């Protein structure tokens, strides 16, 4: 199965029609992010059969010019959000890589890192404003599909929300890595830094005969 097959199934479900109607109304009457053309960017950049790592964000950045349809990613030239700064810091801590000050994570998406936000859109300046049941149903379908994949996959579940999705993951051949969220409020209390998730993910991929992720930007 490919993502296009999945979306062909999803579009026949009742929640798909109501979700599209909701998005039509939101984008028509409010400023929303990311641009409508990038709402499904994560799926466009990371084919289902090439997924190696899944990272879950809660919803897109809600300020201008930040959201680009990839969890935690911002276009180059935009100041790094605090969570992304901490992700880079942990990559450096874990792998000894000096990360650049650019925030576009497309290079990871093209290596098989599915950077998936649980809600694919947001109204400007209002976090979780698109926290609707339709996105919850869609995310459940996505996670269950990923769980059924035969290829080795690492799920990085950061924070309480992402960790709550663990109940949808039953495939014993996949690796689940859990930690606190990389946001300063959580990360600085411990539980994200020095968890070595990036090196552990790469070791798992090597052990299963796959090339590791090049986390260097």
Image (cartoon, rainbow, N blue to C red):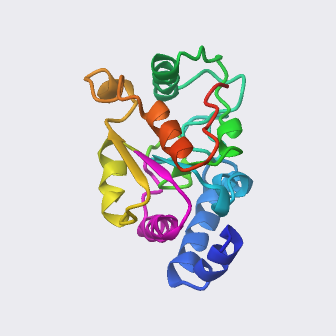
Q: Residue at x 52, y 84 (%)?
A: 14
191, 8: nearer the viewer? 191
64, 173: nearer the viewer? 173
Q: Residue at x 67, y 34 (%)?
A: 65
Name the image quarter holding the N terminus. bottom right
Above or below, 17 against 206 in this view is below
In which quadrant of the rendered view does residue 104 lie? Answer: top right
The mark tally for this picture is 0
Residue 214 appearing in the image: yes
59, 87: nearer the viewer? 87
Is residue 191 rendered to the left or right of residue 203? Answer: left
145 part of magenta stretch: yes
Above or below, 69 against 2 in this view is above
Range of magenta residues: 128-156
Is residue 200 rendered to the left or right of residue 60? Answer: left
Residue 60 appearing in the image: no
Is residue 128 rendered to the left or right of residue 153? Answer: left
Residue 188 placement (x, y as % from top left): 31, 20
Name the image quarter holding the C terminus. top right
Is residue 166 rendered to the left or right of residue 36? Answer: left
């Amino acid at each position: 199965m490919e993502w296009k097959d999945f979306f062909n199934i999803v579009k026949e479900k009742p929640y798909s029609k109501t979700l599209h109607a909701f998005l039509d109304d939101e984008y028509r009457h409010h400023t929303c992010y990311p641009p409508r053309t990038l709402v499904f960017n994560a799926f466009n950049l990371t084919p289902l059969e090439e997924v190696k790592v899944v990272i879950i964000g809660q919803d897109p950045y809600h300020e201008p010019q930040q959201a680009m349809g990839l969890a935690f990613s911002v276009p180059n030239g935009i100041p790094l959000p605090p969570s992304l700064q901490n992700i880079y810091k942990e990559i450096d801590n874990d792998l000894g890589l000096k990360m650049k000050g650019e925030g576009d994570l497309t290079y990871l998406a093209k290596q098989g890192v599915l950077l998936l936000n649980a809600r694919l859109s947001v109204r400007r300046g209002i976090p979780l404003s698109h926290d609707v049941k339709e996105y919850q149903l869609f995310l459940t379908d996505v996670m269950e599909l990923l769980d059924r994949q035969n290829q080795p996959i690492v799920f990085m579940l950061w924070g309480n929300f992402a960790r709550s999705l663990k109940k949808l993951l039953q495939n014993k051949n996949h690796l689940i890595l859990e930690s606190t969220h990389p946001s300063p409020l959580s990360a600085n209390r411990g539980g994200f830094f020095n968890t070595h998730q990036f090196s552990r993910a790469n070791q798992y991929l090597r052990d299963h005969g796959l090339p590791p992720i090049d986390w260097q930007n």
